[in-house]
Image (spheres, rainbow, N blue to C red):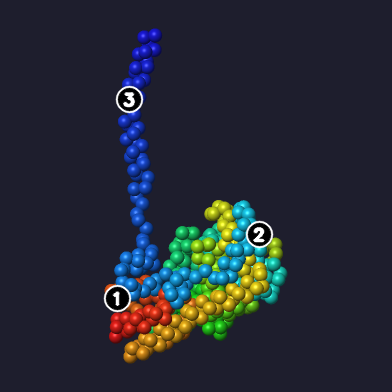
Amino acid sequence: MSALVGGASQSNACGALLRPLRAIATSVRSASWWANVEEAPRDPILGVTEKFLADPNPEKINLGVGAYRDDDGKPVVLDCVREAERRILGKKFMEYLPMGGMKEFCDQSVRLAYGDDNPLVQANRVASVQSLSGTGSCRLMADFMKKFRPEAKIYITIPTWSNHHSIWLDAGVEQETYRYYKPETRGLDFEGMMEDIKAAPSGSFFLLHACAHNPTGVDPTLEQWKAISAVMKEKGHFPFFDMAYQGFASGDCDKDAQSIRTFVSDGHMVGCSQSYAKNMGLYGQRIGCFSLTCDDVEQKNAVESQIKRIGRATYSNPPVHGAMIVNTVLGDDALKKQWYSEVKVMADRIISMRDALRSEVESTGSDMQWKHITEQIGMFCFTGLTPEQVDTLQGKSIYMTRNGRISMAGVTTKNVKRLAQAIHEVTA
């Protein structure tokens, strides 16, 4: 009995000695796991919004956020979307969607992008999956490239939407850039663009903005798109279109898709990212479609299965509500017609604000050229303002990103005159 007691005492004593050591080791290990994590760079648009919200000036203007606003500066929910929600409410289950999302939604999206009468669509040669809006589509493309064309690079415009670089970087895809915007003219650097496309190694991947280029608002003409298509076909490049603004740019969904349809008509195999954030106002629903055209149905099935596999490992399956809304709108002739009308109203307001801003700036007596305001298209205008001029405008309670990009949705009939006068003052 005494031996047992002695052994127990020794064991307890050893345990007492080891406990502090274990605690120290655990503490050191826990503290070091994330000690090397640095704070990520702040999103420049978030910083603009924070400054705007903190400004007490009742006449402050926010030109940073890329979301549509009406002429009172208020968010908009389309009537066709409200009607779709009414029809869905209480009549649909909330079960998981398949890995590829809602097939009917994907079929509707493919027809919207490529055209109902497109031979590839009619022959069932377009692989498509529901995605987490445009960002999710781009990431699926980047991951697909990394897995099946690991040697390939992606060529991205200078400049571009900043998240494009992050998406392909995080997917491990090597990036190159090509010329697109010409600061001297505040328009397209078509010659530089063509030179860089020709100089790229044959079989390269090119990221193209289908319409309403972000952040410049500068788009090629139809004739220029045809020339771009021809040289890319000659070089054997693969065009991937990010189409975030179909219908929102010109007010015409077919016109805004003319770039991608031109390439398909010329015999290209293409990829396409679609988003319904801007053109249906479904920003928070994160609803989009990713598609790749294929040689035949067998290849289409194989490609689609691999995209689904990537999605499965990333987010399992996409959300249901946004898909139900879009499918209800696009699948009903009356609602689809109403949507065409409502998206044109949004586009027309943006176009009218471009006309008004140019007119007001020119009426100040400015000796600078401002025609680029109306020559550009879509949500954003690349004003040509310098970072220092943008900083000065902040002192006047006018907020935008430091590259001089303004969201035209933030311009209204009530603030356009003050905005124009302020721009004149900082550029005079």
Q: CA distance from mark 2 to mark 3?
A: 62 Å
Q: Secondary structure beneath disc 2?
A: helix
Residue 319's disc number: none
Q: Which residue is mark 2?
A: 302
- How crowded pointer 3 is (Cα within 10 Å; few <14, some 14-19, many 20+) is rated as few
What type is the residue that disc 1 sits on? Lys
Whole-percent x, y for residue 334 in the image? 65, 73
The number of numbered discs placed on residues in the rendered structure image is 3
Whole-percent x, y for residue 239 in the image? 56, 72
| Quarter of the rendering containing residue 406 | bottom left
- How crowded pointer 1 is (Cα within 10 Å; few <14, some 14-19, many 20+) is rated as some
Residue 396's disc number: 1
Q: Is residue 221 visible?
A: yes
Q: Residue at x 57, y 62 (%)?
A: 322
Q: Which residue is mark 3?
A: 16
Of 161 and 293, which appears nearest the observer?
Answer: 161
Q: Residue at x 68, y 67 (%)?
A: 125
